[in-house]
Image (cartoon, rainbow, N blue to C red):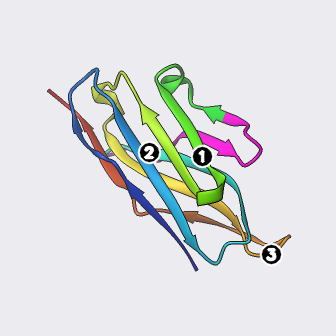
């Protein structure tokens, strides 16, 4: 079993910033990709950003230049720094991780989500 524990969500005014954190714990041999997705009410879950253990990052177009994903591989932790937040960024943000249990076997895990609300 693996647990992903997210923190850092909350209410922020437009133009403000938040930093999300996600720590993976449990039966972990290694972690390849860690990332963030989000789901707004009435919409499908969508990619925000991912980061591979080797450093390659991937961002959705609508967050480029505003959000930054980073990782601490030694701590199995991924962060999402969100700046210049807009009301349309309001959503539940989910952490994800591709966790290897052996050198060849992996499972994709999801956190329970943290609410981010951007409103004045």
Find residue 117 and report its image quarter: top left
- Give yes or no for contact between labels 2 and 3 (Cβ–Cβ under 8 Å): no
Q: Which residue is tagged 2?
A: 38
Helix, strand or loop status at disc 2: strand
Q: Is residue 13 left or right of residue 72?
A: left
Find residue 90 and report its image quarter: top left
Helix, strand or loop status at disc 3: loop
Q: Is residue 20 above or below residue 83?
A: below
Q: Where residue 35 sits in the image (x, y, percent)?
A: 58, 48
Q: Which residues are magenta?
A: 42-57
Q: Which residue is tagged 1?
A: 71
Helix, strand or loop status at disc 1: strand
Q: For marks 2 and 1, give the CA distance.
A: 18 Å
Near-viewer residue (111 or 38): 111
Q: Quadrant of the N terminus?
A: bottom right
Q: For marks 1 and 3, give the CA distance.
A: 21 Å
Q: Is residue 66 left or right of residue 84?
A: right
Q: Is residue 104 above or below residue 67?
A: below
Total number of numbered discs in the rendering:
3
Q: Earlier in the sequence, mark 2 or mark 3?
A: 2
Q: Nearer the viewer, mark 2 or mark 3?
A: 3
- Extreme-right residue of the structure: 104
Q: Where residue 40 sits in the image (x, y, percent)?
A: 35, 43
Q: Residue at x 48, y 29 (%)?
A: 67
Q: Quadrant of the C terminus?
A: top left
Magenta stretch: includes residue 44: yes
Residue 25, label in figure: none
Q: Nearer the viewer, mark 1 or mark 3?
A: 1
Residue 102, label in figure: 3
Q: Earlier in the sequence, mark 1 or mark 3?
A: 1
Q: Where residue 12 sits in the image (x, y, percent)?
A: 22, 33
């Amino acid at each position: 079993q693996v647990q992903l524990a997210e923190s850092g969500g909350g209410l922020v005014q437009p133009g403000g910033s938040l930093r999300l954190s996600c720590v993976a714990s449990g039966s972990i041999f290694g972690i390849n990709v860690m990332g963030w997705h989000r789901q707004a009410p009435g919409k499908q879950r969508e990619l925000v950003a991912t980061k591979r253990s080797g450093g390659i990052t991937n961002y959705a177009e609508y967050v480029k230049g505003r959000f930054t994903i980073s990782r601490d591989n030694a701590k199995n932790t991924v962060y999402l720094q969100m700046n210049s937040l807009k009301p349309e960024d309001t959503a539940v943000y989910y952490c994800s991780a591709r966790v290897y249990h052996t050198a060849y076997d992996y499972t994709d895990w999801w956190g329970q989500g943290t609410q981010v609300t951007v409103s004045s």
